[in-house]
Image (cartoon, helix red, strand yellow):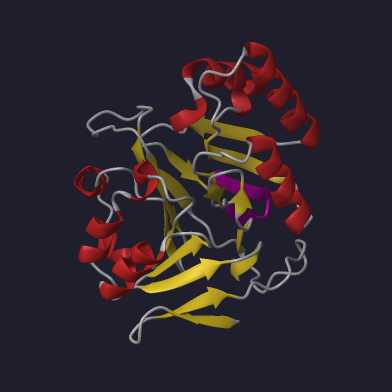
């Protein structure tokens, strides 16, 4: 673990990630995760919620509550959480996929309602952004490479495809749940990296797949590759695009999972 000092008052601990292990290598013995709830999305699902361009979801477990990304607007995010009867003060960890404002715009609103959290982000975020988090009392952890964050929770590590991005990996009894923000590095590349890192197949691939505007042939090629990998279920939304979402729905059939705003995905396997 290395330490970076930014100003005399700010110490950022760079996350030293241990090598990933297979299903017999985790420390816990019971399935920790309960559900994922989509809190912010431009793709609608449940009525009574305010949509907006961006993405955020909440991962609940008995040990940790993880907020994946924060959407573009903090007030909209908090209003949706109130509507869904979810308390932002229960959040232990905020995991940021990448710097774009439609994924980080709600962070200040979350920290203002309870700053005793860890904010985990990939290396490459600008120093003023890191400083603003620390000034609000939150702990900043900078991910340099892929590996374990906590029991059954991993980062893919940062991919640099012009935009530095990481994805979140949850290890469950049925396989991996991989959550992507926008998948700028490529959804297949992210999925392959998650499997290579852990040695475990993907049960559910969820989030933005960054396929808006892609040709039908490109979308079908991606579907073919994910199918060949054995990805069991998919829940595409946000920047995936309507045409691609429809193609994934057709390809996965009953294994297509609704991932729009307000969707609640049970993970108690």
Residue 172 shows in this picture: yes
Q: Is-magenta flag for residue 171?
A: yes
Residue shown at 48% from the left, 71% from the top: 141
Q: Please state the horizontal and vertical placement of residue 150, each as a whole percent of the image.
A: 57, 70
Residue 192 falls left or right of residue 54: right
Q: Is residue 164 above or below residue 31?
A: above
Q: Please state the horizontal and vertical placement of residue 222, each as a whole percent of the image.
A: 70, 26
Quarter of the image with the N terminus is: bottom right
Q: Which residues are magenta?
A: 168-179
Residue 107 falls left or right of residue 254: left
Residue shown at 51% from the left, 22% from the top: 212
Residue 151 shows in this picture: no
Q: Is residue 266 above or below residue 172?
A: above
Residue 134 falls left or right of residue 185: left
Q: Is residue 130 above or below residue 52?
A: below
In front of the other: 209 or 57 = 209
In front of the other: 170 or 211 = 211
């Amino acid at each position: 673990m290395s330490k970076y000092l930014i100003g005399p008052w700010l110490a950022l601990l760079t996350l030293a990630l241990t090598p990933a292990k297979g299903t017999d290598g985790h420390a816990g013995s019971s399935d920790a995760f309960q559900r994922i709830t989509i809190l912010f999305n431009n793709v609608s699902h449940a009525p009574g919620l305010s949509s907006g361009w961006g993405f955020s979801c909440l991962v609940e477990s008995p040990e940790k509550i993880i907020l994946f990304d924060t959407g573009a607007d903090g007030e909209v995010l908090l209003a949706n959480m109130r509507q869904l009867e979810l308390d932002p003060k229960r959040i232990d960890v905020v995991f940021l996929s990448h710097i774009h404002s439609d994924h980080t715009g709600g962070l200040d609103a979350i920290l203002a309602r309870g700053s005793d959290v860890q904010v985990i982000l990939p290396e490459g975020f600008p120093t003023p952004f890191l400083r603003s988090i620390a000034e609000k009392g939150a702990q900043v952890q900078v991910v340099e490479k892929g590996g374990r964050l906590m029991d059954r929770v991993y980062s893919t590590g940062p991919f640099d495809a012009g935009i530095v991005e990481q994805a979140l990996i949850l290890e469950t009894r049925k396989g991996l749940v991989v959550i992507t923000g926008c998948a700028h590095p490529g959804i297949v590349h992210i999925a392959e990296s998650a499997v290579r890192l852990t040695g475990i197949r993907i049960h559910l691939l969820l989030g933005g797949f960054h396929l808006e505007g892609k040709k039908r042939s490109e979308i079908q090629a991606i579907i073919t590759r994910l199918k060949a990998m054995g990805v069991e279920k998919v829940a595409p939304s946000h920047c995936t695009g309507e045409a691609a979402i429809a193609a994934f729905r057709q390809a996965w059939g009953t294994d297509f999972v609704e991932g729009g705003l307000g969707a609640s995905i049970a993970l108690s396997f």
